[in-house]
Structure formats: structure tokens, C-alpha cells
Image (cartoon, rainbow, N blue to C red):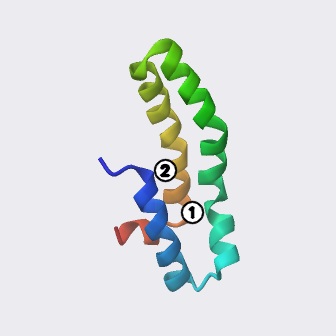
């Protein structure tokens, strides 16, 4: 399973080419994907240590849904290229 990280790496390139965004606009587009990782990373590590990886994985996949729906709603043509 590839996950969202490789998708983000290619989304920035495709957004710059397809929409003509500059690097600042592309970076601002990806902020909603980066900020939750900065906040949730330490919490996920603590949860994994206390509860195990199963509960952390269930919570992570539950939080992944809104992020992917953001990408689908905001830039559907870009996602169709993958």
C-alpha cells in the first residue's frame, strides 16, 4: 500500500503543470495535509506505545478519509491522472 505520501509528492508536480500554480500556491494547497501529521505524529506514537498498533491503525485510517476527500473535492482532475 503506497499511502498518501507518494501521492503528495506527485500532486505538487502535476498541480504546477496542470493549473500553472507557482511553488508558493502549491505549498499552500498541501498545508492541510502536512499540519495534521505534525500534530498527530506524537499522539500516534504515544497511542502505539500504550495501546498497540491495531488501535492506532484504525484511528489513522479513520483520519485519512477527510484528507483524501479534500483532495478529491478540490483537485479531481489531478487525482484522475494517477
Between circles 1 and 2, the one closer to the viewer is: 2
Q: Secondary structure at mark 2?
A: helix
What residue lies at 44% left-to-right and 19% top-to-bottom?
55
What residue lies at 58% left-to-right and 86% top-to-bottom?
20
Residue 82 coordinates in the image, percent (x, y): 34, 67
Q: Which residue is mark 2?
A: 68
Residue 8: image tag:
none
Residue 34 coordinates in the image, percent (x, y): 62, 52
Res. 54 image quadrant: top left
Res. 57 image quadrant: top left
Is the residue 24 above or below the residue 44 in the image?
Answer: below
Q: Secondary structure at mark 1?
A: helix
Looking at the image, tell me whether mark 1 or mark 2 is earlier in sequence order. Answer: 2
* Mark 1 nearby-residue class (10 Å; few <14, some 14–19, many ≥20): few
Q: Spot the residue most to the front.
A: 49
Residue 74: image tag:
1
Is the residue 55 above or below the residue 82 in the image?
Answer: above
Residue 72 coordinates in the image, percent (x, y): 48, 58
Is the residue 45 above or below the residue 77 in the image?
Answer: above
Residue 7 coordinates in the image, percent (x, y): 42, 61
* Mark 2 nearby-residue class (10 Å; few <14, some 14–19, many ≥20): some
Q: Is residue 1 left or right of residue 60?
A: left
Real-space CA distance between mark 1 and mark 2, rounded to the nearest whole angstrom: 10 Å
In this orientation, which residue lies closer to the viewer: 41 or 68?
A: 41
What residue lies at 37% left-to-right and 68% top-to-bottom?
80
Is the residue 12 above or below the residue 39 in the image?
Answer: below
Amino acid at each position: 500500500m503506497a499511502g498518501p505520501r507518494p501521492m503528495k509528492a506527485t500532486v505538487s508536480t502535476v498541480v504546477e503543470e496542470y493549473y500553472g500554480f507557482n511553488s508558493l500556491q502549491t505549498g499552500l494547497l498541501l498545508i492541510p495535509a502536512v499540519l495534521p501529521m505534525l500534530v498527530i505524529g506524537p499522539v500516534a506514537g504515544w497511542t502505539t506505545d500504550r495501546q498497540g498498533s491495531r488501535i492506532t491503525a484504525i484511528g489513522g485510517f479513520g483520519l485519512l478519509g477527510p484528507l483524501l476527500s479534500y483532495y478529491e473535492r478540490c483537485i479531481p482532475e489531478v487525482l484522475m491522472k494517477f
